[in-house]
Amino acid sequence: MSNKFDLSGKVVFISGSSTGLGKQMAMEFGAAGAKVSLNYANNEARANETFEAFKAAGYEGILTRGSAIDEDDVNRVIQETNDQLGEVDILVINATPDQPQKPIEEYSWDFYQSMLDFFIKSPFLLTRAVLHDMKVRKAGRIINIGSEVFEEGVPNFTAYVAAKGGQNGFTRSLAKELAPWGITVNTIAPAWIPVERHEKDPQELKDCYLADLPSKRWGVPKEVADTAIFLASDEASYVSGQNIAVNGAHTVS
């Protein structure tokens, strides 16, 4: 039986893929046969460790360093990907900063701006960097990693929630704009899925969240990665403009 989700020959760029959900997506895309451009901005030692594990698994790809919110960096890492792996077929927009929860009085506009940079500016810069080649080929996949917080309206989280709402709007509008070129644009909205950056989160907060999940279990990064693989495949060629929850029915109203 053929593998419907075989991505052999495809090139994928994943921003922020040295850790967390991005790391798992890089591994799963590699396992599906894609050539992967892993990306990081700051922690070189951690990125090298991830890339060594990626190569040890027998996957093909490169490691690129550059900020997903800096225009020159974005253009450079996409060009490096094009030169070393081929033109990008699949763009996964995943890079994210820390997201502290605070009452609105304790936020500053600079912090709001940092959220907009990661979830509005970064998708804009990355999409623009790969779009010409996708339009020429009349094919492409753009996958935003969003969050369920937009549907939940999580309190004391206004900066992150507002920026994620804007990212979802970007997906919806861009999907219609790019449909004539055979390019799909979707958002995956995960639950709170504990990864490395959640190690120091209060256990009380984790317990409260878990108790509210209809599934009564945590999601795992592979479940997000598998959704991305589906959206990147030919099987999802008519799926576009969607905000796909991967959260065990948490946001069902």
Image (cartoon, helix red, strand yellow):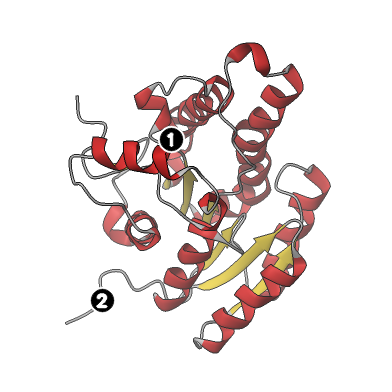
As helix, strand or loop, the secondary structure at mark 1 comes to: helix
What residue is shown with label 1? 175
Question: Measured from the top left, where is residue 121 in percent x and y?
Answer: 67, 34
Instruction: Identify the amino acid type marked 1.
Output: Ala
Question: Measured from the top left, where is residue 225 in percent x and y?
Answer: 39, 60
Residue 231 location, quadrant: bottom left
Q: Is residue 243 visible?
A: no
**Residue occupying image coordinates x 78% and y 43%:** 71
Q: CA distance from mark 2 to mark 1?
A: 27 Å
**Residue occupying image coordinates x 40% and y 39%:** 204
On screen, 149 above or below 86? Answer: above
On screen, 94 above or below 89? Answer: above
Instruction: Identify the amino acid type marked 2.
Output: Asn
Q: Residues within 10 Å of mark 1 (few under 14, many from 20)?
A: many
Q: Is residue 189 left or right of residue 42?
A: left
Q: Residue furthest toward the front?
A: 204
On screen, 72 above or below 51? Answer: above
What residue is shown with label 2? 3
* Residue 246 vs residue 14, the one in the foreground: 246
**Residue occupying image coordinates x 42% and y 70%:** 28
**Residue occupying image coordinates x 45% and y 69%:** 29
Q: Earlier in the sequence, mark 2 or mark 1?
A: 2
Q: Are marks 2 and 1 in contact (CB under 8 Å)?
A: no
Q: Is residue 226 left or right of residue 72?
A: left
Question: Measured from the top left, where is residue 154 in percent x and y?
Answer: 42, 24
As helix, strand or loop, the secondary structure at mark 2 comes to: loop
Q: Quadrant of the N terminus?
A: bottom left
* Residue 56 vs residue 45, the one in the foreground: 45
Q: Is residue 57 visible?
A: yes
On screen, 150 above or below 231? Answer: above
